[in-house]
């Protein structure tokens, strides 16, 4: 049961992060942190940083 709750919370975090990236714009975020906009796109892929970080939160 706890695993299901943890996975649900991770999906909620992931959704929130992806939504905020969409609102702010990948290009703007990339400029702010000094990376190429394509890097932000890769982070959002199924096995990317956003999903992994969400699981840690």
Image (cartoon, rainbow, N blue to C red):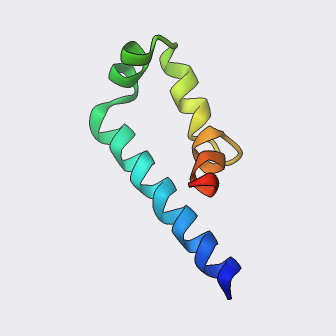
**Is 54 placed left or right of 15 in the picture?**
right
In this view, 47 is above or below 33: below
Q: Residue visible at 28% across and 40% down?
A: 23
Q: Is residue 49 above or below residue 13?
A: above
The quarter of the rendered structure image containing the N terminus is bottom right
List x then y, in percent, for residue 39: 57, 22
Side of 51 relative to 15 (left or right): right
Q: Which quadrant of the view contains residue 57?
A: bottom right
- Which residue is depicted at the point 34% across and 44% down? 20
The total number of labels drawn is: 0
Question: Can you give x and y, in whole percent of width and height, for residue 24 in the image?
Answer: 29, 33
Q: Is residue 12 above or below residue 47?
A: below
* Residue farthest bottom in this picture: 1
Quadrant housing residue 33: top left
Can you say whether 26 is above or below 22 in the image? Answer: above
2 or 12, which is in the foreground? 2
Q: Position of residue 22 (x, y in %)?
A: 35, 40
Instruction: Residue at 51%, 13% (x, y): give it.
Output: 35
Q: Is residue 23 left or right of residue 35?
A: left
């Amino acid at each position: 049961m706890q695993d299901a709750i943890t996975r649900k919370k991770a999906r909620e975090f992931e959704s929130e992060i992806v939504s905020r990236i969409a609102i702010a714009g990948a290009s703007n975020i990339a400029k702010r942190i000094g990376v190429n906009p394509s890097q932000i796109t890769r982070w959002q892929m199924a096995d990317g940083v956003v999903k992994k970080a969400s699981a840690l939160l």
